[in-house]
Image: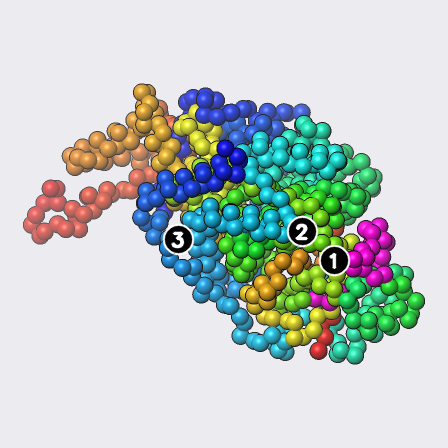
Amino acid sequence: MSARDEVLTRVRAALQESDGAAAPELRGAMSAQAPVPRDYRAAGEDPPGSAAVIDLLDERVADYRAEVHRVAPHEIGTTVARILEGSSAVVVPSGLDAGWTSELAASGTALLTDSREAPLDVQTLDGADGVVTAARVAIAETGTIVLDGEPDQGRRAISLVPDLHVCVVRHDQAVQTVPEAVRLLAEHPERPQTWISGPSATSDIELVRVEGVHGPRTLHVLLVG
Amino acid sequence: MSTYLGLPTLRRKGDAGGRATPSGTRPDEPFGPVPHPDDPLRWGETFPQAARAALGNDQMRANLGHATSTIRAKRASVVGEVPDWEALRDAGAAIKTHVMAGLPDLLEELERNVTARGGVVHWARDAAEANRIVAELVRAAGVDEVVKVKSMATQEIGLNEALAEAGIAATETDLAELIVQLADDMPSHILVPAIHRNREEIRRIFLERMADAPADLTDAPRELAMAARAHLRRKFLTAKVAISGANFAVADTGTLSVVESEGNGRMCLTLPETLITVMGIEKLVPTFTDLEVFLQTLPRSSTGERMNPYTSLWTGVTPGDGPQKFHLVLLDNGRTRALADDVGRAALHCIRCSACLNVCPVYERVGGHAYGSVYPGPIGAVLTPQLTGSSGHGDPNSSLPFASTLCGACYDVCPVKIDIPSLLVHLRARVADEDRGRRVPTGWGAAMKAASAVMSDGGRFALAEKGTVVARILAGRKGYVRHLPFPASAWTASRDLPAPAKQTFRDWWAKEHEQPGERSDR
């Protein structure tokens, strides 16, 4: 018998063997017949993009020691140029709004365009000073931004290898709770997702939090609206 | 649940109960005593033996006390801010119950969806088979070096050692796992495997074992973390094959997920050409939206953060983005044995957050190594003996269900509401049942028989109560008895006996219900 068939046979046998043998006080609470109780919050009290949600997102992202910038749409280019001032090379995904980086390019920084079809090699990514991406959704309560690999966010490697990540989030992309974000992301579960909550960090030494290990050590989030 | 049933004595150490190999702790280890087990789930010593040795290690106990109190406070604070925490726990528990009941179909559904998206699914009956599959896949990729994301499943099967035997060097990339690997140590915590080490010990390990560690390295956590970053960077950027575990696998989409902090997970899951993921068959969730429950409860329970820095989700192969070859190894290795016990099966609901370790008064004092398994603490005490099976007193893993005071703190914090105290009692009963056929009664059995004779007869019981006067005298003013003669010494060897009350309940009752003019003596 193949390993596959044997494991599945064992699983089925285990479930049959155990039917009804357990003490009732332990079974009652865990019946597989009853539907899953979903009494938790499926959405927050504040609608996506509302001032309350943006304020909370701002506070929670900053709590991870990421830098938050509240800007109007026409200020994106200037803000990006200011953050990356003096950089020699910055990675951009092929689908990024060109207006976000035009001022940076004008200041003399080389823009390295990356896509699935024409990927930069990892050494080039490692040599870049930073990366600018959009986002798919942001979660206020947890201070999380989610990228799903679409052309304005790019391959997973580009937001990982460069040491500085600038992520642009529109107000209407911000939701209050995790379930709101998951239900949105469930529309395209096949897309590779990266959930980012602050810069990379470790607490492995005496549970002391140290920001900046293997992922970008600096994270800037632009909240645009 | 408050009955403390005591530890069974061990009489047949090292018999056929399994590969009860001595853990081989050598006194001349450069970084203190570290275990070298042959079997990651059965290190050889019983819990009482290992605990006694661990209690002599003051440095480790201080390190653990500091670390667990820090994480307990962090967890309590971020859990406290979630208004629907209990509803999330209820949902998580129910989802996992459904997963176990529907496991065969869910596994086939997962296999179908991973395959449809370009992944290859492998099945492994046990550790040896899983290790063989992984080694063959690495060889097929033409390399002898791999990078690894921290994974309990690969710890459980001893993958690194098996790969080393096959001539393949595996580098752990999680900071704590790296510390453990460099010190040739074993993990002592599910989430923070090097929790038993303090910063000065870590500095010494890096200086001696990490070739490129800066000579002027101090013990500041930031400096130590930066040394690890520099050490691993080149490996990440050149690795061809990575090996990971999985926190969740979604049956209805074929999506896998790894939850992490440092970005070493992202490095491994993104940059190499080939990704091999080893996952226990119980790690499933039925639907993508079920993640909305666990991605709330897991980070807050484990690191005490609102969300961990990085969570990666991938579905098979994404052309042009990430590894173009993806292998998923589904591991049984005793899980179906646990599944067959419909009480014990709840241990398979575990999402490896480690909150139960951090609140456990026993774990905090003896540390992870005393449990003799890569799964320590309360969850380890119920999971390990079920994964390996046990054979009564001779098996060191039979002592694990007794490694608890049944205080219930683990149940209170469990994000999927595993009733660990009830499972412990259930498994203790199984150990007792396994011993029923024995010819020579255990001291425990004899004591219980004697107690039964006394307690089932009112006259005998009243007589026995008179004897408690002696215990009161022995207890003296301190109010507890430290040493009793044999056979009662079996009890007092490891615990004090409180002095009996001045008045027995029966005397009190008789006095309270005394009719006027009637004698209190019945």
Q: Chain of mark 1?
A: A
- The structure residue drawn at horizontal position 67% and vertical position 25%, both measured from the top left corner, is B28
Look at the image and tell me in which quarter the C terminus of chain B lies: top left
Residue at label 1? Answer: A155
| Image height of A40 relative to B65, above or below | below
User: Disc 3 on helix, strand or loop?
Assistant: loop
Q: Chain of mark 3?
A: A
- Which label was assigned to residue A122? none
Task: Tell me whether marks 2 and 3 sit on the same chain.
Answer: no
* Residue B201 point in image, percent of width and height: 70, 38
Closest to the observer: A105 or B377?
A: A105
Closest to the observer: B510 or B79?
A: B79
Q: Is residue B192 visible?
A: no
Task: Say which label, 1 or 3, has the lower sequence index.
Answer: 3
- The structure residue drawn at horizontal position 78% and vertical position 63%, both measured from the top left corner, is A93
| Image height of B409 relative to B162, above or below | below
Residue at label 3? Answer: A32
Task: Locate residue A119: give its quadrant.
Answer: bottom right
Find the magenta span and give its range: A112-135
Task: Locate residue B56: give its quadrant.
Answer: top right
Residue at label 2? Answer: B317
* Residue A190 point in image, percent of width and height: 63, 58
Q: Distance between the Cα atoms at labels 1 and 3?
A: 40 Å
Q: Residues within 10 Å of mark 3 (few under 14, many from 20)?
A: some
